[in-house]
Amino acid sequence: MAEPTPRATTAGAGAEVRARAARVVQAVRADGRSLTDALAQLPPFDDPRDRALTQELCFGTLRALPRLEALGAVLADRPVKSMDQDIAALILIGLYQLAETRVPAHAAVAATVAATRLLGKPRAAGLVNAQLRRYLRERASLEARVARQPGVAGLFPQWLQERLTRTWPEHWPAIIEASNARPPMTLRVNVMKTTRRAYAEALAAAGLTARPVAGAPSGLMLDAPVPVTRLPGFADGLVSVQDGGAQLAAELLDAQPGERVLDACAAPGGKSAHLLER
């Protein structure tokens, strides 16, 4: 799985990232907040890489939530008190780091334990440390134990997996696998300002490689995702981030000058902008 490359950082910065991520995950799990909305409420970061890592921890934890919650339940001696849902979220974030990222285990544990103090609950440091270190010791057996639980292996709700199994008995495993795969980072070149070939050359000059998207004349798929700040001309509107499938909408509609088009689900309006560019 792709995630921000681990970097040298102070213990304080690492703990702050985990504490912020825990607050966001808590807001989604316990308060029913939108992940996008909860992330938008975070204070500014001094280093954009810290924001990228925070987002990775939040998105990744919530993506793998059924498995992480099952692991947390096995590791816990007793249910976490309702007033400590932020600590429960912090433990899930710690488990996600150990299970799914390239963050060194010692750094992940240390920063996650230190985050308890920033959450105002230093008494929970021992609990967080014990559960994460137990996971490291017993990882294989714990993963095998929770994998047998319904909805854990495929990260799909049981009712949805059952429906997929009935409707596509031969293809449901491939559907689940594809649904859980991380999408590539795909760009749409603004043809009012440049061409796909010229922008691909600009990417190459910046040390980034990409390939054309089939069926999308303005599309380029990066071989590895990067922060948008690394994209040449992003701030000047030379390129935007848009899924390859979404780029097909403008091509298939083929709107002509003078026609009136209603984008009935615009947020933030990428396909509408694409129609205008064409």
Image (tube, rainbow, N blue to C red):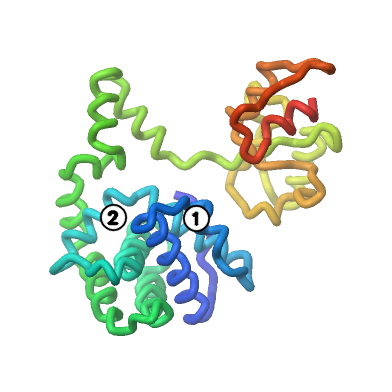
> Depth check: 239 or 265 in front?
265
Picture coordinates of residue 72, whole percent (x, y): 23, 61
Secondary structure beneath dot 2 equals helix
Where is residue 69 drawn, in percent x and y? Answer: 26, 55
State the residue in front, 42 or 13: 42
Q: Residues within 10 Å of mark 1 (few under 14, many from 20)?
A: some
- The x, y position of residue 141, in whole percent, is 16, 56
Q: How many neighbours does mark 2 have within 10 angstroms: few (below 14), some (14-19), or many (20 or more)?
A: many
Mark number, residue 83: none
Res. 86 image quadrant: bottom left
Relative to 28, is 55 on the left or the right?
right
Is 114 situated above or below 73?
Answer: below
Which sits in the foreground, 44 or 175?
Answer: 44
Position of 185 with respect to 202 (left or right) is: left
- Residue 270 occupies quadrant: top right
Please name the residue that numbered disc 2 is placed on.
68
User: Which residue is depicted at the point 79% across and 25% down?
Assistant: 278
Front position among marks 1 and 2: 2
User: Foreground residue, 85 or 64?
Assistant: 85
Q: Is 246 displayed left or right of 236 in the figure?
A: left
Look at label 2 and name its amino acid.
Leu
- Reply above or below: 2 against 52: above
At x 28%, y 38%, the residue is: 157
Residue that badge 1 annotates: 3
The amino acid type of the residue labelled 1 equals Glu
What's the distance in space between the residues labelled 1 and 2, CA to CA? Answer: 18 Å
Residue occupying image coordinates x 34% and y 58%:
30
Q: In the image, residue 273 lies at what x, y percent?
A: 74, 33
